[in-house]
Amino acid sequence: LNEYIERLVWRTPGGGSRGGPEAFDPKRLLEEFVNHIQELQIMDERIQRKVEKLEQQCQKEAKEFAKKVQELQKSNQVAFQHFQELDEHISYVATKVCHLGDQLEGVNTPRQRAVEAQKLMKYFNEFLDGELKSDVFTNSEKIKEAADIIQKLHLIAQELPFDRFSEVKSKIASKYHDLECQLIQEFTSAQRRGEISRMREVAAVLLHFKGYSHCVDVYIKQCQEGAYLRNDIFEDAAILCQRVNKQVGDIFSNPETVLAKLIQNVFEIKLQSFVKDQLEECRKSDAEQYLKNLYDLYTRTTNLSSKLMEFNLGTDKQTFLSKLIKSIFISYLENYIEVETGYLKSRSAMILQRYYDSKNHQKRSIGTGGIQDLKERIRQRTNLPLGPSIDTHGETFLSQEVVVNLLQETKQAFERCHRLSDPSDLPRNAFRIFTILVEFLCIEHIDYALETGLAGIPSSDSKNANLYFLDVVHQANTIFHLFDKQFNDHLMPLISSSPKLSECLQKKKEIIEQMEMKLDTGIDRTLNCMIGQMKHILAAEQKKTDFKPEDENNVLIQYTNVSKMIQYASKNICFINIFIVLCYAPSFFLLCLEINEKLYFLLREADIHFYVISIEKILQACVKVCAYVRKQVEKIKNSMDGKNVDTVLMELGVRFHRLIYEHLQQYSYSCMGGMLAICDVAEYRKCAKDFKIPLVLQLFDTLHALCNLLVVAPDNLKQVCSGEQLANLDKNILHSFVQLRADYRSARLARHFS
């Protein structure tokens, strides 16, 4: 509307803007609007009259159309009534025709039978006369009609008495046989020519003859001519069945029966002969090759059966094919598990023996029975090495190569067991294979190595002992992981839904517990040997006078009076957080204090500086012990995994602490000796950090704090004992350390500590 008004305005003279060529004239624009509105009104009235006229015309036509529709409905109803009458009449006539047809058939059927019987009697008379004159018997092109006649005569002859009609019966039978042979020959020729339609015609005629099965046999025989040209008989058989499946439906009326008979012929003749040739030659001479061939042949046969499942072989083709496979392999599968277990035992024994022979090792017999069990219980409780200790020269007698070979042989046995065992026997057979694996891998190899390793652990007082049992632990742990993986990957799927599952799990649990018990015993005795080695180092390198030198003045080259520093530090013990750092130099050690900021200013005010202590071989024992401990810690970390590392390191750390604690209790300490003891313990504490075990570090922190009691001024003993690290210790422990001081008998020290 807006656009329309705009166009109207711009067309009207004087309707533009004031700046246009013509001035804006509102009167002329108003007149133009009024005139245009009048024109629109006239146009509206004209259109309205036209609309009314069209509506009237539409109503008139609607009435006429409704009238026509009513007339057509009446005509349709009349036609429908006529159709009903016609349908009833047709039904009546059809009933009459059917009745008439039945009557005619009732008359014609006996007539046809009579005509057919007359023809058969005519042909029968020719056999009686001994001369066949009918064209149907003399014309080779009418062999189909002759076959139909002779088949009926043959059935009739079967009902005739033999004494009166023996001659004619024999002639009919002879002609029956001749025609049958001709039909089979014709079928054979058509098959060779590839004439499917002719084969279908002949097969349809032969369907009512006794020789129909012979026709099928001929077809099956000729199908297989030239079919086995490759080296793979299974692939040839699959291709043959696929080719026959495509054409057998175009030839025979019962293709599934013919195809099933072909497959049966292939299995019972070709495959059975092939399997027998492959297995019989190695059945008694080579068990390994026999099992491999049996598994391969059975697998390929079942794969062929799976391909044949795609074809139509009748209602129960699964059972049909299963019976064919069973007929081929039943004689081999009946005693399969006996062959499997016998071979696995001999093969496993050979692998182990070959390994021990390569090591020039004669296996010791591990005793069993009551005496051995009693020794084992005593050894577990007392940690005594019962029996002679043997020197294995560091040999663990564990080999991952041997283990891989044993597991590979067992894996193949599990695979063959899964394929060749009857489903009802599968769990039991798998369990028998598992017991053999346990016997040779876990008992004959791992358990023997653990027993040998235990016997090779020296006593705790041996010097320079070769502690190789941790290598045994490391290898045994790795091997058992492989064993556990095969248990889960290959055994569990075979027994997961049978009662044998709980039996296998129980046996595995017993093996694990038995091995863990021996590993625990060996690790415990190895730790004792480590502690024994440390004792030897301390006994050889540490002297009674190390912590109570006769002339302390020759020990120190002082830049600051040491006693002054000790006295000042003792008085300000609440500000001190001391530990000792040893910086190695030729025949010198730099003794430093690491202090907090407050202590630093205190020492500056007291005019205390760094000082040098010359200690001739005093810390040599400590250095050697720490070097030995670090080496053993690293070995433990490399030999174990998981939480076992922390557990063993904690046990070693606790025993290491106990050793140092008891060692320090053996000496008497002067003031300078106490400082040297603190140096030792500081180095031990630094070594304890390598354990990364909070308990061990805490023990050495406490021991370091206890060593401060050896040098602290008597006046500050009570204050030191009530400090954070020593407050919770038993008073007897504190007292035992104070008693180690050389000045313990002085009245002043006794008065302050009491």
Image (cartoon, rainbow, N blue to C red):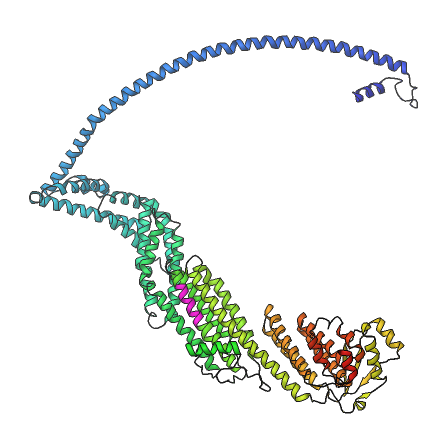
Q: Horizontal and vertical percent for residue 307?
A: 40, 53
Identified at 88% across, 77% down, the residue is: 604
Q: Horizontal and vertical percent for residue 662?
A: 66, 81
The answer to whether residue 223 shows anywhere in this view is: no
Quadrant assignment for the C terminus: bottom right
Q: In terms of depth relative to the viewer, which is nearer, 636 or 324? A: 636
**Which residues are drawn in magenta?**
429-439
The answer to whether residue 77 shows anywhere in this view is: yes
32 relative position to 63: left or right: right
Above or below residue 670? Residue 133 is above
Q: Horizontal and vertical percent for residue 200?
A: 30, 44
Q: Horizontal and vertical percent for residue 687?
A: 69, 77
Q: Is residue 438 magenta?
A: yes
Q: Quadrant of residue 543?
A: bottom right
Q: Quadrant of residue 470?
A: bottom right
- Most prominent secondary structure in the magenta stretch? helix
Above or below residue 421? Residue 96 is above
Q: Is residue 688 magenta?
A: no
Q: Quadrant of residue 30?
A: top right
Quadrant assignment for the N terminus: top right
